[in-house]
Image (cartoon, rainbow, N blue to C red):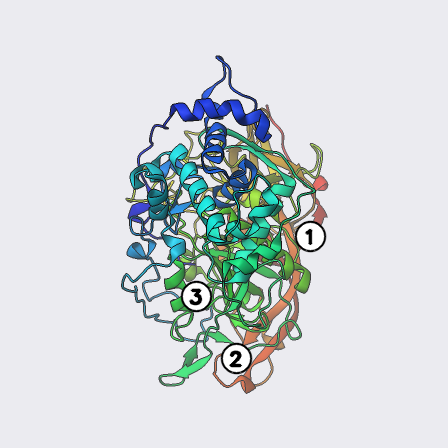
Amino acid sequence: MRGPVTEPAFAHRGRRTRRTAGAVASAALLLPLLGAAPPPNATESAAGLLQRAFASAATEYHVPQSVLLAVSYLQSRWDTHGGAPSVSGGYGPMHLTDARTALATATEHFADGTEDARGDGARPALHPRVEVPAESALPARLRTLPKAAELTGITAAELRTDATANVAGGAALLAAAQKSLGEPLSADPANWYGAIARFSGADDAATAAAYANDVFDVLHTGEERTTDEGQLVALAAQPGLKADTAQLKLTGLHTVAANDTECPTTVSCEWIPAPYSQFGTNDYGNHDLGDRPASQSIKYIVIHDTEGSWDTTIKLVQDPTYVSWNYTIRSTDGLIAQHVKAKDVAWHAGNWYINSKSIGIEHEGFLASPDAWYTEAMYRSSARLVKYLSEQYGIPLDRQHILGHDTVPGPTTSTIPGMHTDPGPYWDWRHYFELLDHPLKRTAGKKGGLVTILPDYATNQPAYTGCVTKGQPCAAHGSDEVRLYSDHDESSALIKDIGLGTAPTTDVNDLSSRASTGQQYAVADTWGDWTAIWYLGQKAWFKNPATAPTAVSAAGLVITPKAGLTGILVYGRAYPEAAAYPSGVPAQSISPLPYTIPAGQQYVVGDEVPGEYFYAVTFDTGSHRVVVGKDMYYEIQYGHRVEFVRAADVDVVPSSKAGRHHRR
């Protein structure tokens, strides 16, 4: 949502030692009966401790181990995050919430009032009123950890920092939920649907049901992965399992009145409208009424993070003097709130051209807080929404159309330094595209000519600075990005972005020399374990060893300057030629950015689009116009951000015909 921020104070906690109570070891003998991993032997490594913790807690609290594992997977994918809380104050594999200790609203970070998220110089920049609400009574979903402490007798400190204790706390909460429904502590996972729904902490039946359905999806498919602490955890698939969904009635959760939200039926979605209202002297906010897709195509979905808590974010989007976006997704349970209809134009991207052709989705989270993590419930809910929107509006599921806010281009040279950097390097694009049912993968042999950036998220841990204090190291954490150098040597200079006007750094918000998972580039050179790509008009190198590749081969179309041209201009928006504007609509400047593409370089084509401008600068929609020109543009992956080039300036060729050099 916002640009560079300071990390919340709660985002880091020290690493802790794991409790190894005798009960954990003895419970391991029960694992064969529970369908999990075999019991340990004298030579077994510590990598199975967490699996045995699930078995122990399941036995002690009479919760089916598969239910406990599936709920935990949806909460955290079994990761512990070093004892650090999520954005909603959730700790450990069970995401037990203790927002009194880790209150996200205590460190909200929003715009300084000088940005123009609308991204259109035809109207003055907005000056949002930022109000951080006073601390108030917290909903039950944000204080499950104290409840777990009451049920187990385990201290809150242990529940926050010890994974074994945390799993026990989650089991106790599930058992208590089952008892509160008047249901027996059944060994059959099918009989726990109501307890799972209540465990979600959702305020309404639809959200609780969506959460429980996700848990049962995990039970049906099974999962296996190595966690962030090297723990191998497995859950066997139960494809024939049928939940007793009638138990939802026992929860007593209220039913949300029918609404006209634009969401898939597989998620819980509520309507919290952003206001379209006039105020002050001929001013209005916080979005524009439109007629999409009839008048203009919707080509992009922009992924944001909120840089604030759910409650504060919802209050801001209802402020007519602030900016807007189409949807917000909650961390704890994946609840979706829609604020702006798809036909209308939200002010979220900082680039008016992208705004007018996109849908913006905010996710409760913090960019510069690697351990204020995104929950699996939120990832899954978001993926379902994006798949739905893709089908509704014909938006391709690739990184040229599913943009991060950090890949939206600055519309003019002066705006480049202030463009936003969320969701940042800790958003797991690889996992996200798996949930979109469009996994990122190799699509060509060695002669494909392109690469798709695709490091292993968990083990790929480039060093970043500036999460807590400027210049200071961030905590080691998985990342979706690779770092780019001027030569095939990690001691060589980082790639510089001349549009930023500053020397490149490793700061978590500095995008100068970073390529992100799913982005595609033309191969410029190779040297041993290194690959060079064309990036920001330069040859940029990243480490790509065959034994642990950070990119895979791809094929596609690339643009290259037409023969005879020494270089071509690059644009941050695809606006029409002056002759296309009708009377009464001022022609917008076609402003090139400070970037160029020299002869001989190639850049991957994302789309071909006509020049287009949505004239909407008044509250009265009668003057609104969509101007479409004859000049065509290609969207390209230029650096970390996408950009545009005029079709008349380039040739489009298959990547296999692009010129490349190979060295050893």
The image's mark for residue 551 is none
State how far apart marks 2 and 1 are (Cα).
31 Å
Q: Residue at x 51, y 34 (%)?
A: 542
Q: Residue at x 41, y 66 (%)?
A: 314
What is the quadrant of residue 123 in the picture?
bottom left
The image's mark for residue 651 is 1
Amino acid type for the residue under numbered disc 1:
Asp
Decide which of 34, 206 is in the foreground and name it.
Answer: 34
Horizontal and vertical percent position of residue 173 = 43, 45
Query: As drawn, is 129 to the left or to the right of 194?
Result: left
| Residues at marks 2 and 3 touching, judged by CB atoms closer than 8 Å | no
The image's mark for residue 117 is 3
Horizontal and vertical percent position of residue 635 = 61, 56
Q: Compared to 25, does 348 lie above or below?
A: below
Q: Residue at x 56, y 43 (%)?
A: 431
The image's mark for residue 586 is 2
Q: Residues within 10 Å of mark 2 (few under 14, many from 20)?
A: few
